[in-house]
Image (tube, rainbow, N blue to C red):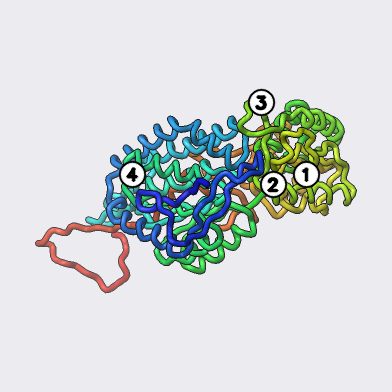
Amino acid sequence: MRTIDHWIGGKPTAGTAHRVGPVYDPATGRQQAEVALADASDVDLAVQAASEAFVSWSQTSLSKRTGILFAFRELVRAHTDELAELITSEHGKVLADARGEVQRGLEVVEFACGIPQLLKGEFSDQVSTGIDSFSFRQPLGVVAGITPFNFPVMVPMWMNPIAIACGNTFVLKPSERVPSASVLLAELWAEAGLPDGVFNVVNGDKVAVDALLDHPDVAAVSFVGSTPIARYVHERATQAGKRVQALGGAKNHAVVLPDADIDFAADHLTAAAFGSAGQRCMAISAAVAVGDAADRLVETLRAKAAAVQVGPGADSTSEMGPVITQQSKDRIIGYVTSAEGQGATLVADGRTIQADALQDGYFVGPTVIDHVTAEMDVYRNEVFGPVLVVLRAETLDDAIALINANPYGNGTSVFTGSGEAARRFQREVHVGMIGINVPIPVPMAYYSFGGWKDSLFGDTHVHGPEGVRFYTRAKVVTSRWPHSETGGGASYSFPTSN
């Protein structure tokens, strides 16, 4: 059985824990590898390597850092297919989707290549007689990233390129379900010329997570995952004195107004709900049909859901692959069954997959559920699967109120031909990322990604300008160079400008 090791101090290492976990192929249900699971001593070894590397890396010139970033960009681009195949084999998403994930990660690397511009400080001349004032930003030290299974390349690359470009060193704890891509990225960083210890990977479970949250030499933690774990990470790491950004779960709504192009809206909702088997924190999981748009939308969604090609991610004809584990499949089916029992209408039922070739994998078909209410379990919880629920609202005001009453505030969209309605929507919803006729409004790398309410714990969003601020801290310098013959002229009063 192939074993996937950690990457510490510039080389693979099995660690000292002597614990391993299974890595499955979700399309077949068979174990394909085992991954080393770190304990506190392994985490400490990685943090020590990062601490030692920080001494010189933080003093490395911006031109040398950017040279390595540009080289890393080219290597990731050259290995896109290899990374995509690793993603598909361990996550299950189709290859085209996996390639898109790598591309969105590359956009953050490209943003980080502009770090000399992003780290430019400020200067004020003659703030007082003979005195100047200026500011600049410096790295924090060792920072950690704890990332989810659903984006094994993109989410880590939301974090580590910017952190490293800013002069920090990085310890990544990827999901133990999808470890291989992180190790390949570590190899590519090394090939790009990144010094040993600047980027490290420790695979593991809660033991490794807690060790990172508690370690006194870890200055900051970035996390993406479910809301309960995001809250836990934020509370435990902040108690340990760390800077934290913890992105949690979502219940993303798409409002469809009567004046919308129904076929266009349904086409995009189908892709947004069932792409990656719904295992995206920005997936649309709730459609809010307003007024007489409802019946037309539901019938169109029924036909489009039935046409989705479900199959192994490595099959070029597949449009949607499996979910990540048998436990995920069982949980999703449970929510669908619960909705049916609570009075909702199943428009498309994906609980049973007929194809014999898919019986051993973790497949759930596209599911559309109509007449869902805010009290139903399938709406109140983050299903994280290929399930689209349809709620009905009389007016745009009702739809906005429904969204604002939900505890999550990650992403939302509106489909309409009215600029006035779209402007009202974008101003009035309590959500961090908004799409206008765009179902998955993930910002480009030069904007920052993050939600509101229970979708984010901490003060800053991830990547983009807020990512640079998160991974650095400011210094302000007030300087004077007096002529020796003028003397001191010190005052016992509080200093003022004059």
What is the three-letter code of the residue carrying label 2? Phe
Mark-to-mark CA distance, 4 and 2: 36 Å
| Mark 1 Cα-neighbour bin, 10 Å: few <14, some 14–19, many ≥20 | many
**What is the x, y in percent for residue 451?**
61, 49
Q: Secondary structure at mark 2?
A: loop
In this rendered view, identify the residue nearer to me: 356 or 347. Answer: 356
Mark-to-mark CA distance, 3 and 1: 37 Å
Mark-to-mark CA distance, 2 and 1: 22 Å
What is the three-letter code of the residue carrying label 4? Leu
Q: Which residue has dot 2 on it?
A: 384
What is the three-letter code of the residue carrying label 1? Ala
Q: Are marks 2 and 1 in contact (CB under 8 Å)?
A: no
Q: Which residue has dot 3 on it?
A: 317
Q: Is residue 236 left or right of residue 369?
A: left
Q: Earlier in the sequence, mark 3 or mark 1?
A: 3
Q: Is residue 106 left or right of residue 29?
A: left
| Mark 2 Cα-neighbour bin, 10 Å: few <14, some 14–19, many ≥20 | many
What is the three-letter code of the residue carrying label 3? Thr
Q: Which residue has dot 1 on it?
A: 399
Q: Secondary structure at mark 4?
A: loop
